[in-house]
Image: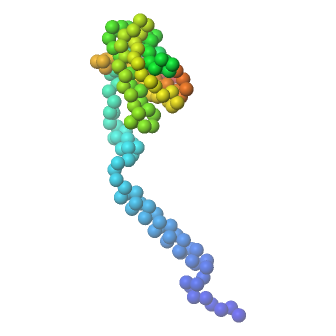
Amino acid sequence: MTEKLPIWRNPVLILVFVLPAISIIAGVGLLVMALRTGGDDPVLDEVRRTARGAQVTDLSADQAALDGRFAAVVRVDAENGAVEVFPVSGRFTRNAPLRLVLSHPVHSSEDMTLQLSPSDNGWRTEAAIDTGHDWNLRLSPGDGEWRLQGRLESGELAARVQPALQDAGDAP
């Protein structure tokens, strides 16, 4: 009545030995695939760079903007196809042009660099800006002495740009 099955035909033993063996083989296969991928992953490169403690950005322009208490408003005039910058605080050199970099948050091919000329109330240039998505803004003079940063949200026509660094007294 009780017929003894060979060990390889026992279903419980198949679960105990075969399933772990399959998972080990799959794990080794995934590890091999991960190691064979090229080193062209920008996220992985950024993690490696920050893990080594390398700082790749010069913050002196941000510190100069903080020390000079610079702040401005960037306005997109969609009707007339223009971009304007109005100073809020700081000692801007009013007769010198400014450079405004609009960076697309996803597609760097859509980035724009605008040269703004002095106008009656600030600086202005003719440019058609797509307000259907966000823009990262970076405003600086031609010599790059200081730098202001901000974000123009989707559908908005104006944004404040200010130093990326904050004063130690302003920190939460």
Count of residue discs: 0
Residue found at the very far left of the displayed protein = 143
Q: In percent of the image, x 34 and y 30: which residue is there?
A: 57
Q: Which image quadrant is residue 59 in?
A: top left
For this orientation, the residue located farthest to the bottom is 1
**Residue 24 in the image: above or below residue 148:** below
Residue 130 vertical placement versus 85 (above, below): below
Q: Quadrant of residue 162?
A: top left
**Of residues 17 and 99, which is closer to you in this image?**
99
Q: Which of the image's four quarters has the N terminus?
A: bottom right
State the image coordinates of residue 49 (x, y, percent, origin top left).
Answer: 34, 40
Q: Is residue 17 visible?
A: yes
- In-front residue for pair 13/64: 64
Residue 154, horizontal then vertical, whole percent: 53, 28
Residue at horizontal 46%, vertical 20%?
A: 81
Colour setting = rainbow
Please name the residue shown 44% across and 18% down the image: 82
Can residue 71 be seen in the rendering of this structure? no
Q: Position of residue 166 (x, y in %)?
A: 44, 20
